[in-house]
Image (spheres, coloured by chain):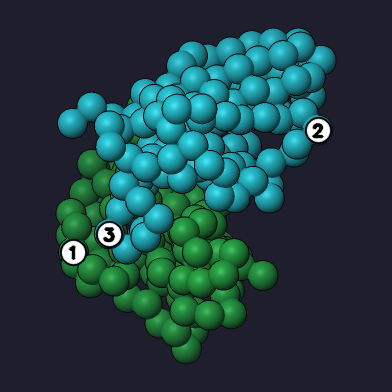
């Protein structure tokens, strides 16, 4: 099966600029996640979608980060304006459904963002 | 609060030696525990989960609720085991249901 697709792979921007990341989950996966992984740390959940609805966005810095999954398939994550501390790898993952017992996460390759 | 602790950032062993990657957790209920692995230039992927009680690539992990640990073990390490390993947990109820909490990871290097 095709895996989770993410683009771009790399992005370098200056602080206060805007950036957007795109994710295409595995076909049929209802649940989509965005994780932020800062260098030297484990991935941290930013937002979780179930189809096109937000399940958990408690860790999303809503003053600058936004995400959408309008048709319940692809998703975009946006940062506006970016700060230096946003430099990280942004991982998208998908799973079949809500119950992780039967639906492990499948991760994309990630987008490495560098904010200068 | 939920927390996953991997005390070793780096771990090196020689080929054929036993290896144990430590993971401790804190969670008020009954979590589900996982090990994820990321090989060089590859994406993060599930290695094993405690509910399956399976051995993947020779690795096993036992959930010890008394010690709140989920250490990953392999009796004879191979060079291809060199990778970054992440321990993770998900809650089984309330706001933690379906949400993965990751440790910071342990970079395992197996020398020839």
Give the spatial CA distance, label 3 vs label 2.
35 Å
Between B97 and B75, the one lying in front of the other is B97
- Element on which disc 3 rests: loop
Q: Is residue A93 left or right of residue B19?
A: right
Numbered label attached to residue A63: 2
The part of the image, by quadrant, that contains residue A32 is top left
Query: Badge 2, how many Cα within 10 Å: few under 14, some, many 20+?
Result: few
| Residue underneath mark 1 | B55
Give how far across and how far down residue A89 sits, in percent.
Answer: 56, 30
Against A1, is B24 above or below? below
Q: Nearer the viewer, residue A35 or A116?
A: A35
Disc nearest the viewer among 3 and 1: 3
Q: Chain of mark 3?
A: A
Relative side of A32 to B9, left or right: left
Q: Any idea which chain is the green one in this picture?
A: B
Task: Tell me how far mark 3 sits from mark 1, CA to CA.
Answer: 17 Å
Res B73 seen here? no
| Label at residue A102 | 3
Q: Which chain is disc 1 placed on?
A: B
- Point out residue B6 in the picture as x, y percentages from the top left corner: 53, 61
Dot 3 and dot 1 residues touching (CB under 8 Å): no
Q: Which chain is cyan?
A: A
- Whether discs 3 and 1 lie on one chain: the answer is no
């Amino acid at each position: 099966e095709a895996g989770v697709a993410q683009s771009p792979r790399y992005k370098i921007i200056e602080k206060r600029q805007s950036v957007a990341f795109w994710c295409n989950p595995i076909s049929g996966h209802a649940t989509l996640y965005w994780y932020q992984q800062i260098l030297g740390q484990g991935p941290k959940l930013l937002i979780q979608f179930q189809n096109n609805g937000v399940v958990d966005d408690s860790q999303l810095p809503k003053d600058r980060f936004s995400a959408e999954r309008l048709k319940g398939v692809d998703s975009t994550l946006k940062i506006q304006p970016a700060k230096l501390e946003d430099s990280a790898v942004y991982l998208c993952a998908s799973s079949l459904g809500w119950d992780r017992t039967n639906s492990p996460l499948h991760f994309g390759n990630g987008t490495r963002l560098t904010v200068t | 609060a939920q927390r996953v602790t991997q005390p070793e950032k780096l771990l090196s062993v020689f080929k054929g030696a036993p290896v144990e990657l430590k993971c401790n957790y804190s969670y008020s209920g009954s979590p589900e525990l996982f090990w994820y692995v990321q090989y060089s230039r590859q994406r993060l992927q599930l290695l094993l989960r405690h509910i399956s009680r399976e051995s993947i690539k020779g690795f096993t992990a036992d959930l010890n609720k008394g010690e709140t640990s989920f250490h990953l073990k392999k009796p004879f390490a191979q060079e291809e085991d060199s990778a970054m390993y992440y321990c993770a947990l998900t809650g089984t109820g309330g706001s933690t249901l379906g949400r993965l909490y990751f440790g910071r990871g342990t970079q395992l290097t197996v020398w020839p």
